[in-house]
Every structure is written in C-alpha cells, then in structure tokens.
Amino acid sequence: MSSKNSEFRNIILITQVGISVMVPVFLCVALGVWLDNRFDSWFTVPLLALGIAAGARNAYVLVMNVVRNEEKQRRKHLEDEIMRKVDRANHKNSYDRENKRIK
C-alpha cells in the first residue's frame, strides 16, 4: 500500500471519529437546552453526559473495527508470503530431484 493512500485513510478516520463524537454531544445538548427552555428544568447536564458517553462508544467501535480489519489484512499478507516461500521451496526441491542434484 502506498504511503499516500495510508495518509488519506488516516485523515478520513480522524474525521469520522470526530464527527461520530460531536454529533451525539451536540444533539443531546440541543435537546437539553430545548427541554430546559420548555419545562424550566435541568435536562442539559444529564443529556450532555449521555451525549459524551454515546460519542465515546461510537469512537471506540469505529476505531476497533479499523484495527480488526488491519489485523486481518496483516495476517492474510503474512500467510500469503509463507505460502509463496513454501511453494518456492517445493518447486526448488522438485527441480533438484528431477536433475538428480545433491545439495
């Protein structure tokens, strides 16, 4: 993978994490302010805490999915590399046996 693609992917991930944290916080604060003005109460603080918790959960889920996908890709790459080396060794051994060469 090229470095440029990796940089763009990281920028996109940071943007997604930021949006996934900000949206629940802003929605909960807006709802809390509206409820406070409508019913003359204190809904903003508990809803702010709820929004922060929801945003943190969203960020955690998003980042863990990316980590799992990258781990799968890394393992697949390693397995492919091992299989290429095994095939190359088997091919070399069969070539040596056909030509009756001794190592």
Image (cartoon, rainbow, N blue to C red):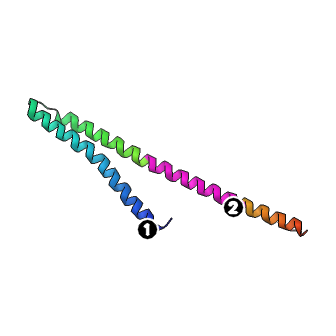
Circle 2: residue type: Arg
Q: Is residue 67 above or below residue 85?
A: above
Q: Earlier in the sequence, mark 2 or mark 1?
A: 1
Residue identified by numbered label 2: 84
Left or right position of 19 against 71: left
Residue 47 place in picture, x, y as percent: 22, 35
Q: Looking at this view, is 87 or 51 the one in front?
A: 87
Residue identified by numbered label 1: 4
Left or right position of 82 against 100: left
Circle 1: residue type: Lys
Q: Is residue 93 above or below residue 74?
A: below
Q: Is residue 95 above or below residue 34?
A: below
Residue name at image x 26 percent, y 39 percent:
51
Question: Which region is colored magenta?
Answer: 64-85
Would residue 74 be counted in the magenta stretch? Answer: yes
Residue 32 place in picture, x, y as percent: 17, 36
Q: Are marks 2 and 1 in contact (CB under 8 Å)?
A: no
Q: CA distance from mark 2 to mark 1?
A: 27 Å
